[in-house]
Image: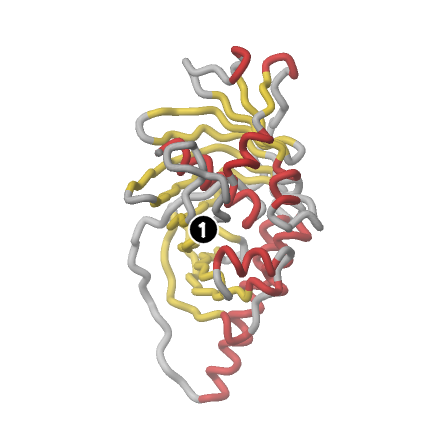
Amino acid sequence: MRSRVMKAGAITVAAVMGSVLTGCGDGNEPTGAKDGGSPSASRNDEDRDTTAVRAAYDKTAEAESARMTVRMKLAAEGETVTSDGKGVLDLAEGDSVMTITAQGESLEQRVVDEVLYQKTPGRDAPGGKPWAKIDLRKVAAQEGVNNQRIGDPARTAAYAKAITDKDVTEVGTEKIDGVNTTHYRVSVDVTRLPGGDRMREQLGPTLPMQVWLDDEGRLRRQQMDMTVRTAASASAKPDTGAAPQQLKMSTVMEFSDFGTEVDAEAPPAGQVADMTDKALQQS
């Protein structure tokens, strides 16, 4: 079951969020929450907060690349799977190189030109190939979000456009890896996002999100906690490998070392087994 949950989670995140790299929060308590003030002051604060959050995606993308750590918690069918990852991310193209550890097992993961590649030591893909690949464009098309490239800055900018003044609340200030940040709670109207109608079916009307911005307005942490409803196969039977119908997902990505080098290359074609069709059947 765990492999099915992990695969369903990866495919759902790829289609819904435009990324297959997710994680879970660490539960740190924020400090320095805002005090109450006059209505006009509160209005100005809300405007400032919304402007900061909406601008964060562009300011982060301007750094071109970053080191990233990822933590993920997936729960379905009464079981929970956790994973940790670290690597580097091209913020402009969406390419990445990561090492993921889950349930005591590590795998190498790359995203290159919107294709996900995974290699698990000691476990070959079909045909004895060391690498398996999934075409994320086909996954996105099946999920109804095929109108923009996965990883395209325009796609992440869509989040900013979906955020209004009533959707942003400043929580306080925190340090992340020694860096001063401001913590915001954000509620995104999913119908304003690309593929919003499909996302509403899976997530409900809003996407709860938390972001931590540094003094330059860049994302240092982004956290999401959501319940994803997946489509049930009419022909699916128990223990056939079909994806679970509901996933609880707790995710966080943390960014540091902006401007770091990213060397993401696809494995040699002869070493890769295409698992896209199988993944689509389980998504």
Can you say whether 161 is above or below 89 in the image? below
Image position, residue 262 (x, y; %): 59, 31
Three-letter amino acid code at the position of disc 1:
Arg
Q: Nearer the viewer, residue 91 or 232?
A: 232
Q: Where is residue 114 in the image (x, y as percent from the top left)?
A: 64, 36
Q: Does residue 254 appear to the left or right of 197 in the view shown?
A: left
Q: In which quarter of the image is the N terminus?
A: top left
Q: Position of residue 268 (x, y in %)?
A: 64, 15
Q: Residue at x 45, y 59 (%)?
A: 209
User: Farthest right residue?
Assistant: 147
Quadrant of res 210: bottom left
Residue 43 lies, in percent from the top left, at 51, 82
Is residue 123 visible from the viewing direction of this image? Answer: yes
At 46% from the left edge and 43% from the top edge, which residue is drawn?
22
- Nearer to me, 154 or 228: 228
12 vs 47: above or below: above
Badge 1 crowding class, 10 Å Cα cut-off, few under 14, some 14 to 19, many 20 or more, is many
Work out whether 11 lies above or below 153.
above
Residue at horizontal 61 percent and vertical 27 percent from the top? 264
Q: Which SS class for mark 1?
A: strand
Viewer-side residue, 65 vs 79: 79
Residue beneath label 1, please?
221
